[in-house]
Image (cartoon, helix red, strand yellow):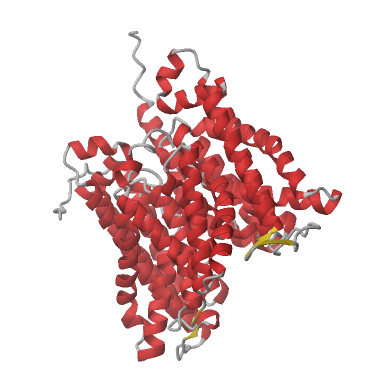
Amino acid sequence: MLQQIPTIVVDGILLGLIYAILGLGLSLVLGIMGIVNVAHSAFIMLGSFFAFELFRRMGVDPIVAFFLSFPVFFVLGALVYRLLVTRVERAPQTQGLVAMFGLMVLIENLGTIAWTTDTRVITAPYTNASLVVGNVTLVHVKLIAGLLALLLIAGFWALLRFTLVGKAIRAMGQNRVAATTIGVNVARLSAIMFGLGIACAGAAGVALAMIFPFSPNTQVQWLAWAFLVVILGGLGNVANTLVAGLVVGLIQTFCTAFMPFDYVYLVLYVLLAVILVVRREGLSHAVRRAI
Amino acid sequence: MFSVFFLPSKKGSRAARVGWALWACLLVALIAYGAFGRQLFILSTLGTVFLYVVLTQAWNLLGGYGGYLNFGMVTFFGIGAYTTAILHHHYGLSAFLTAPVAGIVAATAGLLIGIPTLRLRGAYFALVTMIITFAVQILALDLEITQGALGIYMPRLPLTPLGVERLFYFLFLGFAVLVTALVYAIQHSNIGWALVAIREDEDAAEIVGVKTVEVKWAANALACFIAGVVGGLYAQRIAYVEPIGTFAFDTSLNVVLMAVIGGPGTWQGPLIGAPLVLLVADALRVTFTSEVNRVIFSVVVIVIALYIPGGVMGVLQRWRRRQSAAPAPPSRTP
């Protein structure tokens, strides 16, 4: 058992990186725009099938699909923002939730019509290869997916920290009215932010598809994971989301090593309840604004 | 925790009296059909409609009046179904006796989920209820007491198929009337107004002395209790519970659809939404697959959320207000 621990830790970190990008889009959209995007996991599922279709039809490698997914889902997200979110942004919270819930069901069922409920996998040439360093086994796909996720997180961090758009987005998150006053185009920036959130979901879907089997109707469980990361890491902060993702990943690999797989879910749900009780002051005010 | 009292409402106009007369006629017609109808299919479909009326009314309490959406109503329904099934399997108790126990177990589960999430504002309750169904389903699959994927069989009642459907037709109809009356009473009590105040502006509600958190907990526990009882009865109706079907996400989805389409936050909303969604869904099922069906309904939900927030009742209320406002000429003064 003890020799396995390094492998478990490395596995946990790699998984954690992917969980971090699962939660990142949700966290930014919720923290900066105050929108509870219930349909987040539906876009993750679409990302997985984006990679699947590219791979099946054109033999495009999932790594390439990861980079392709970003612009595609960015446009998709901006469209959803224009068509749907702008109309419920100022409405009472329940209305927005219902609309996003409807969108989730719509995407899930369109997915089921297109791809049926069969469970799919992507088998890239390097899927079953692994690298052994000392007594740590590194599975290639996990390594690649983890590194891609890290790249995405670093990109988001740099974007929000160093670019003018990033600074404007953060200003909007801190105070929408003040940001408008100093000349930030809040409407355009919100569309960009929402697009980035969905792009993140799509890319996360590609990364997930490299490692896990997927099907259209099991997407809600990824919402659970993303939501857990968001609650643990707080809203709208890239670095904290990364840490939260790593924690969730490590908890999962340690739990799977020591108990039947299904119980991991239960451990995570209990964790979710505990965090909600412990962290309630930190969470309460952030979601109060819009949807 | 808090006292409940009723607030006097202004006595009805002519339109309101006509409305009451229509509801009464409908009830009489349904009772007559239950007593004399011989079509098994219609009896069974209407029985399911009543079941959903009960679930949607329960959802309406916190979701419609309070604005806290429960996206996992099936969790509590399924917990109720499993409770009566387990009590029958291990102790030989009839589901009709143990349905209240099923309600209490479901209400306890509701409190367990509500206590951490309903202290918080915003969407935490909605998100947790949406994802908790999976956890409960996994428990039902893995625990020994639920017999995993095998499920639990219950003995069929010693009646003809028509007799069984008729029994549950009346059972669910009675329950639907009871729960609707309860929701009506709550709407006209201080608790109903407290929930509406929470929906409209929770800060203001708290400032004027509404115990917001406790009211939300109570409404949620009551809703879960009702869902649990009806789940317990449902287990006896189909005489078999298993994890996938009993915790089907479709049930949660249907409840939200019915409430949103009928008009959340009104006692009439579920009475309109449940038959509308279920009968249209049944009609579509003949021609389309269930996925196409859900695509259609999800588009309807999005459209309603974007353009017609009050659902059918919202449209009716606006129309009635315009009718009553129409005779008075508009003021000319700027």
Residue B274's spot in the image, x, y percent? 48, 57
Front residue of B238/A201: it is A201
Left or right of A283 on screen, residue B193: left
Give the quadrant of residue A15: bottom right
- Eyeballing the image, is B253 above or below A198? below
Query: Looking at the picture, how far across and down is residue A267, in whole percent?
Result: 43, 65
Q: Considering the image in quadrants, where does the C terminus of chain A appear?
A: top left
Q: Which is more toward the observer, A47 or B93?
A: A47
Residue at the extreme front of the image, as rendered: A134
Residue B328 shown left or right of residue A199 in the figure: left
From this view, report whether residue A230 is shown above or below residue B237: above
Residue at the image position 27 percent from the left and 55 percent from the top: B217
B87 over B110 or under it: above or below: below
Q: Is residue A214 visible?
A: no
Q: Quadrant of residue B83?
A: bottom left
Residue B212 sits above or below residue A178 on the image? below
Give x and y (percent) for residue A254. Answer: 50, 65
Viewer-side residue, B159 vs B143 = B143
Nearer to us in this view, A291 or B317: A291
Asked if residue B216 can be seen in this view, the reply is: yes
Residue A75: image x %, image y %? 67, 33
Residue that extends furthest to the top in the rendered view of this protein: B334
Q: Which residue is depicted at the point 28% across and 51% down?
A: B216
Counting every numbered tag in the picture gives 0
> What residue is drawn where x is 47% and y is 58%?
B131
